[in-house]
Amino acid sequence: MTVNLIFKIAAVGILISILSQVLKHSGREEMSFLTSFAGLILVLSWILPYIYDLFQTVKRLFAL
């Protein structure tokens, strides 16, 4: 995992939280939820290969 990925996740988190608050205060709770959900899916798509590698490493460790 690189530091660049951590910074990208932090940037997405900050942007999504600001956008979510703006949408909530303007009365668009549904759009706020969808924005948060889209941010979650985006970050999970970035992290999923690392989670897969983790499970493969654990599998190889216990396959002795």
Image: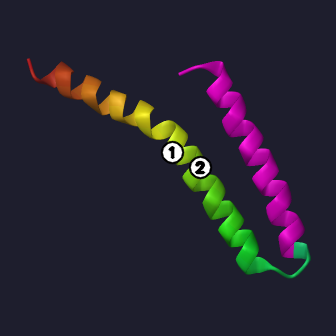
Q: CA distance from mark 2 to mark 1?
A: 5 Å
Determine the residue positioned at 50% across, 38% down: 47
Determine the residue positioned at 10% across, 23% down: 63
Q: Magenta region: which residues?
A: 1-24
Quadrant (top left, top right, bottom left, bottom right) of the C terminus: top left
Three-letter code for the amino acid on which mark 2 is drawn: Leu
Q: Is residue 33 above or below residue 53?
A: below
In the rendered view, does 59 fall on the left or right side of 7? left
Q: Position of residue 6 (x, y in %)?
A: 65, 29
The residue positioned farthest toward the bottom in the image shown:
27
Circle number at residue 45: 1
Q: Is residue 13 above or below residue 64?
A: below
In the rendered view, does 13 fall on the left or right side of 60? right
Query: Picture quarter containing residue 19?
Result: bottom right
Q: Are marks 2 and 1 in contact (CB under 8 Å)?
A: yes
Three-letter code for the amino acid on which mark 1 is drawn: Ser
Circle number at residue 42: 2
